[in-house]
Image (tube, rainbow, N blue to C red):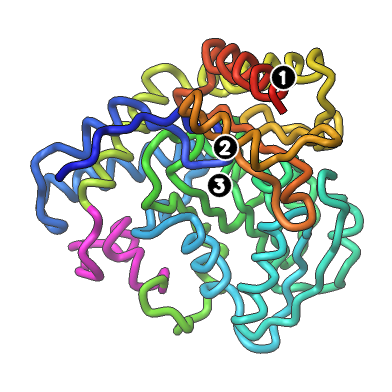
Amino acid sequence: MTAPVLYRHLFGPGPTNPYPEATAALGLPLLGHLDPEFIARMDRVNAGLRTLWGTQNERTMPLSATGSAGMEAAFVNTLQDGDVAVIAVNGLFGERMCDVAARCGAEVVRVDHDYGTPVDTQRVLEAHPNPTVIAAVHAETSTGVRSDLSAIGANKGEALLIMDAVTSIGGMKVEADAWGVDVAYAGTQKCIGVAPGLAPFTFSDRAFERRVEKPQSWYLDLGLLGGYASGASGGKRAYHHTAPVSMVASLEAGIDRILGEGLEKVQSRHEQAGASLQAGLQEMGLELFAAEGHRLPQLTSVRVPEGVDSASVRSFLLQEYNLEIGAGVGQFADSVWRIGLMGPNANPASVALILTALKDALSRA
């Protein structure tokens, strides 16, 4: 027996509710992964991703996996035994970068920050005289903090700069080329407003020239992937794997939705929704977690009031309002909530619903 359709307001750290156009595109007739029409679709998607990334990189494509595979692809193609990776850690995903880099055999130089604070450019640049890569998270999903990576890119020297933009792409300004970013990865399930399943990825010529020739991962080998997903090897597309063709169609629809509205307008919509939510939470007497001046508009971290059971509030919101917000991570799992306004959810109606539901939940806590 088929279960009833259940709609959730996905206001957690991701996934978000997708754009309707992206959902509808999942039902388009299936194409073969080497069909000329699908290759043309992939080319359009790659072009759209270049706009979202702010890059001219030829090797810009959606990897056939989630954003975590994008992270892995970034490191396995740039690091091998004995290389040095300087990694800024100001949240869970900086921690995860360290793990992935270490598994590549790299010497990891951590630059630790308090959770809730942005990356300290100077400390990162001074951490090692000649690293192979420098890596940092642009929008830290675990804490709701944004960091300015442009100064790192301008002063990186010979290092390659790797950027995690999972929570920023499509919702706030990302300028990979202007910021000196060599490798960047993201996911579809946040501000791009598409279901999880693909990892938007970009890899500069500079990075490709210095890539690991035979990385430990066959599936994520950019030398092989580029010839299929982006045609970067020139000439005829080379078979690599069977791409998730319906997900690529959905991503095309999501990108078209964003660019049709206007990328700057979409970014402004996210900024306004986040500012409104954060003002409303503070008017309720709640304390925001991320450092002032560095708060993400699309993902707000807020401290759970003393004496309030975090899980009970989240359960109430889910049961009574079909509304999901996220818990914190690590040591902040029970003391922080993470509230996302991403993709189509970045709008005044979502803000009003969240504030009303949370007031109700807290009044009963």
Residue type at mark 1: give it: Ser
The magenta span reads 221-244
Residue type at mark 3: give it: Val
Locate residue 125, reporting x and y percent.
Answer: 85, 60
| Precedes in sequence: disc 3 or disc 1 | 3
Q: Is residue 356 above or below residue 341?
A: above
Q: Is residue 304 left or right of residue 40?
A: right
Residue type at mark 2: give it: Ser
Residue 315 has which mark?
2
Q: Is residue 288 left or right of residue 8?
A: right
Q: Residue 224 lies in what quarter of the image?
A: bottom left
Q: Which residue is mark 1?
A: 363
What whole-number distance in Å separates the C-alpha atoms at marks 3 and 1?
34 Å
Residue 166 has which mark?
3
| Precedes in sequence: disc 2 or disc 3 | 3
Locate residue 102, reporting x and y percent.
Answer: 67, 79
Q: Which image quadrant: the N terminus?
A: top left
| Precedes in sequence: disc 1 or disc 2 | 2
Locate residue 3, reporting x and y percent.
Answer: 23, 40
Residue at the front extreme of this rendering: 364
